[in-house]
Image (cartoon, helix red, strand yellow):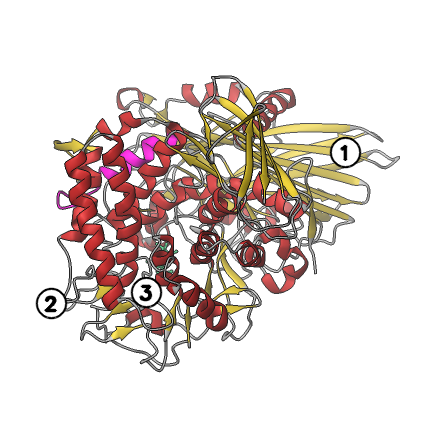
Amino acid sequence: MKFGHFDDHKREYVITNPKTPYPWINYLGCEDFFSIITNTAGGYSFYKDARLRRITRYRYNNVPVDDGGKYFYINENGKVWSPGWKPVKTELDRYECRHGMGYTQITGEVDQLEAEVLYMVPLGYHGEVQRVKLTNHSDRKRSFSLFSFVEWCLWDALEDNTNFQRNFSTGQVEIVDSTIYHKTEYRERRDHYAFYTVNEKVSGLDTDREAFVGLYNGFDAPDAVMECQSRNSHAHGWSPVASHHLQIELLPGEQKELVFVLGYVEVPVADKFVQNQVINKAPAEEMIAKFQSSADVDRAFKELTAFWDDLLSVYQLEHPEQELNRAVNVWNQYQCMVTFNFSRSASLFESGIGRGMGFRDSNQDLIGFVHQVPERARERIIDIASTQFEDGSAYHQYQPLTKKGNDAVGSNFNDDPLWLILGCDEYIKETGDWTILDEMVPFDNDESNKASLFEHLKRSFYHVVHNLGPHKLPLIGRADWNDCLNLNCFSETPGEAFQTTENKEGGVAESVFIAGMFVLYGDAFVKLCEKLDLKEEALEAAGHIHAMKKVVDEHGWDGSWFIRAYDHFGEKVGSDEREEGKIFIESQGMCIMAGIGLEDGRARTALDSVKERLDCEYGIVLNNPAFTKYHVQYGEISTYPEGYKENAGIFCHNNPWIMIAEVLDGNGDAAWEYFRKICPPYLEEISDLHKTEPYVYSQMIAGKDAFKPGEAKNSWLTGTASWNFYVISQYILGIRTDFDGLLINPVIPKAWDGYTVTRKFRGATYRIEVSNPDHVSAGVKDLVLNGEKLDDMLVPICADGSVNQVKVVLG
Ligand code: GLC
Ligand code: GLC
């Protein structure tokens, strides 16, 4: 069952039934100021950091699930409704929510009165603009009241949720005309405030929640709205809010447009006040002046659309299947921007207070984003590397506001360092910018202790070499990519965090996954060295990789698949010898991506085992058989009920590794089948089962052992976005970035006739037409650039600004 449809022309998902199986969200903003918005106008805003600089309040795990947001209420002669259906939930004659690229437009209509609200964060603007269009479609004059509503958060979202003994006494506001200023804690150490305004005189205001809502009401029936009378309240402590009341009259056919702005301002400390207790409003006034009219909103909207036109034009596919075009050209790339911006910090499943930016996550997010805004990817790489320690190890996470490593989450996730090589390698391949390797980058943010980024990569590489276990496989540390495979943890205490709790002294558990990773990204390091003409460096590193391959051959192969790890006692994890968790997906993907077993048939055998034991209708599960009891020596993975999360859920993030493995084995049909199974637009028809947004990937789909296979959770913030874009754009469609050009090597289903990709790369445009007359999966028979046949599969870099025709014939 569907709850809407794609509008491909406008790049929107149009929700036509407000009762989606879960709130379906969008993200506004792509630089500093962000909002999350649901299809019924729930959600919240923050500046840079969802924990430390939360602007409006949101209650996670609320009842009902999505209450609190940027609400508008209409009261016409006692009939009260909201354009987004919620919070009032009056039945609407028409409802539509259009989630687009950086904006959301929600429209409701009751008795021929239409209210359309456009929510957007304009480029370069530290605020959310809301344009309300009210249209009288009837043939009688209408008079009604419009109320706006937002609830302020007292900045630190964690404190805001917990420290009520203080919070209830600190809230402060100022009011000037139609503008409500939220200035809690500004009198002391904060140099920032927020404001909410409308471009018209109001007939009333509220800034105190209890006065506006009433102590015993919900957002669905605030006193002020129900009685059509603002209280003109002034908040002193408790919960400051902002609500405007406008009285409106519309003649038949008449339309009225209002512009609301929710803004955030920072003021230099010396200029904070104009007099005691009176805040300096000049920067806010400047912001407000930019959005005085609907025409200002139109202009900003056009700029935003042009911005996305430009971003998305870097990789555009023309394919007979519209679902695939949607994924590749619009939604997958859009999600990559979102994961780049937020890592795993703020969604409807990530509360914005738990996690900052992940070291491994952000490096992987880069690979689906680097073609969009390479300069930002560059900055991100430097930020991440700046949190690395001298010995190559890394903080697992850092806070986006401070850019400093997060002590509370610690380090010793021994895969972390290697992901930095992946991030850098993909950046250089996209941009050709080798200077990044010369950047001087601090260790642990200590400006007095710096080394080149190249040196950081080297430390990443050697961190593995210096941390080998009894089999000479890499020590796993707290965990590798699988945060829940905690082999040194042995936790017996309820509530202890598996990722941060003290590990067993001298933990010797080893990871075959990291071994595969070392071969793969270690090899990328070697190639960088070779390119830089560091022959000895390259040779030495290659020696370590060679040794690691031998260790994997000796200790990493179980007979029909790759072993996953060795536990603390030296027992195999992910082996036929075990009763539960005989086979895991990650080591199959990573080892084969590294090329291990491709030549001797072990890769094929492992992939057949994946098909037989891990594949199911909705994707590839992480392990099998699922754990049915707690294995203290495995940790969190065995805490999840069967079929969920890391315990045999379809953890979508690692499915693309198997797709790449199939591609490397030349099997386009299998790669495509796996791709299609989890690709959101192909799941639109089962939205009721799938539950999460049909336009983005979710972290996890319940696996075959689950109570409800096919049900997804944790949408949006997942490495699945970047890996799937990477796999489809570079491996299946086969347009790969390389140091000296574009490598063309499609591996596709035999049934495909062909497709065209337009790729902008290093200043030139390539229109690449792939045809498959013999219906093969792989093999480039002919590659022609601007009429000239090329000898190998590399399309060289063409002149800046040039438009080039590339013809690819498979066969
Ligand atoms: C989550 C984490 C990611 C980890 C994965 C598997 O998505 O953000 O870092 O690799 O889970 O445990
Ligand atoms: C939990 C989740 C895992 C995530 C981790 C982050 O263990 O299951 O997916 O990576 O938390 O700390």
Q: Is residue 429 left or right of residue 210?
A: left
Mark pair 3, 2: CA separation: 19 Å
Q: Nearer the viewer, mark 2 or mark 1?
A: 2
Q: Is residue 328 above or below residue 607?
A: above
Question: Helix, strand or loop at disc 1?
Answer: strand
Q: Which residue is mark 2?
A: 505
The quarter of the image holding the C terminus is: top right
Query: Can residue 377 be seen from the camera position used here?
Result: no
Q: Is mark 3 within 8 Å of ligand 2?
A: yes
Q: Which mark is residue 484?
A: 3
Q: Is residue 289 magenta?
A: no
**Regarding ligand 1, which quadrant of the image does it lie in?**
bottom left
Dot placed on the residue nearer the N-terminal end, 3 or 2: 3
Question: Helix, strand or loop at disc 2?
Answer: loop
Q: Nearer the viewer, residue 424 or 744?
A: 744
Crowding around mark 2 (Cα neighbors within 10 Å: few <14, some 14 to 19, many 20+) is few
Q: Is residue 380 magenta?
A: yes
The quarter of the image holding the N terminus is: bottom right
Mark pair 1, 3: CA separation: 53 Å
Q: Is mark 2 within 8 Å of ligand 2?
A: no
Q: Nearer the viewer, mark 1 or mark 3?
A: 3
Q: Is residue 395 left or right of residue 210?
A: left
Q: Quadrant of residue 107?
A: top right
Q: Which mark is residue 135?
A: 1
